[in-house]
Image (spheres, grey):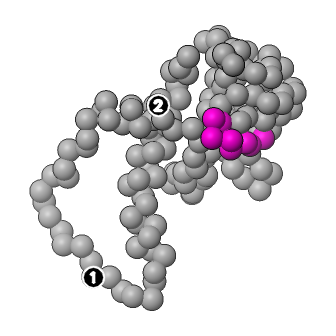
C-alpha cells in the first residue's frame, strides 16, 4: 500500500540532499580555497526523467534535509514505516531497515487517516504511516502524518 503524499515529499528531500551533498563536502574543507566556478549563460542541464525520481522516492524509508527559507534554515525529517507505539501526544515509527524515531504531536500537526482528516488519537499501533517532522530544540514534532491504516504482517 502506498502513501501518495510521501512520494513528492521524499523526492524533494532526496533531490535537495543530492544537490546539496557536493556543496556540503566543498564547504566542509575551508582550509583550501577553491576558485570560483566559471560563469555561463548556458541553461542548466535538464533533470533526469521524473520516473527515476519516483523510483528513488519509493525506495526511501527515512531521511533528513535542511531547507533554506525566509525565516532561515530549518531541518525536516521524513520517515515511512509502521507505528510501534502511539498516544494522543506522540507516535513511534519503525522503518523496514530497523530505524526507529519518536515524534511529538503539536496543536498544528496535520493528521490524515485513510485519506480523510483525522486526529492524532486515531493513529494506532501497526498502522503504516508516512511522517514529515520539524526538528528543533524540543525534538521532532509532526508537521504532517499520513496513516494508511493497518499494514500486512
Please report the residue visible at 57 percent of the width from the left and 57 percent of the height from the top. Answer: 72
Instruction: Read off the residue under disc 2.
Output: 58
Check the image and name the residue furthest to the front: 153
Residue linked to disc 1: 35
- Judge the density around disc 2: few (<14), some (14-19), many (≥20) Cα neighbours within 10 Å: some
Q: Residues within 10 Å of mark 1 (few under 14, many from 20)?
A: few
Q: Does the magenta run of residues contain 96?
A: yes
- Is 56 covered by the magenta stretch? no
Number of marks drawn: 2
- The extreme left residue here reads 42
Classify mark 1: helix, strand or loop.
Answer: loop
Badge 1 vs badge 2, beta-carbon distance below 8 Å: no
Q: Which residues are magenta?
A: 95-102
Name the N-terminal-most of marks 1 and 2: 1
What SS does tag 2 mark?
A: helix
Answer whether residue 133 is visible to the viewer in this image: no
| Cα gap from disc 1 to disc 2, whole angstroms | 38 Å
- The residue shown at (13%, 60%) is 41
Which of pointers 1 and 2 indicates the residue nearer the eye?
Answer: 2
Visible residue check, residue 74? yes
The percent coordinates of residue 32 (x first, y second) are 39, 88
Q: Residue 17: x percent and y percent?
A: 46, 52
The quarter holding residue 86 reads top right
- The residue lying at 20 percent from left, 44 percent from top is 46
Residue at 48%, 35% in the rendered image: 59
Amino acid at each position: 500500500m502506498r502513501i501518495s503524499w510521501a512520494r513528492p515529499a521524499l523526492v524533494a528531500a532526496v533531490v535537495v540532499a543530492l544537490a546539496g551533498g557536493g556543496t556540503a563536502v566543498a564547504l566542509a574543507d575551508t582550509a583550501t580555497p577553491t576558485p570560483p566556478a566559471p560563469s555561463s549563460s548556458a541553461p542548466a542541464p535538464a533533470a533526469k526523467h521524473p520516473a527515476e525520481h519516483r523510483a528513488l522516492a519509493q525506495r526511501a524509508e527515512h531521511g533528513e534535509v535542511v531547507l533554506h527559507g525566509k525565516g532561515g534554515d530549518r531541518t525536516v525529517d521524513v520517515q515511512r514505516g509502521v507505528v510501534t507505539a502511539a498516544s494522543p501526544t506522540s507516535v513511534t515509527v519503525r522503518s523496514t531497515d530497523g530505524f526507529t524515531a519518536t515524534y511529538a504531536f503539536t496543536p498544528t500537526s496535520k493528521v490524515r487517516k485513510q485519506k480523510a482528516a483525522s486526529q492524532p488519537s486515531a493513529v494506532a499501533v501497526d498502522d503504516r504511516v508516512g511522517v514529515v517532522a520539524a526538528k528543533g530544540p524540543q525534538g521532532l514534532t509532526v508537521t504532517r502524518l499520513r496513516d494508511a491504516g493497518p499494514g500486512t504482517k
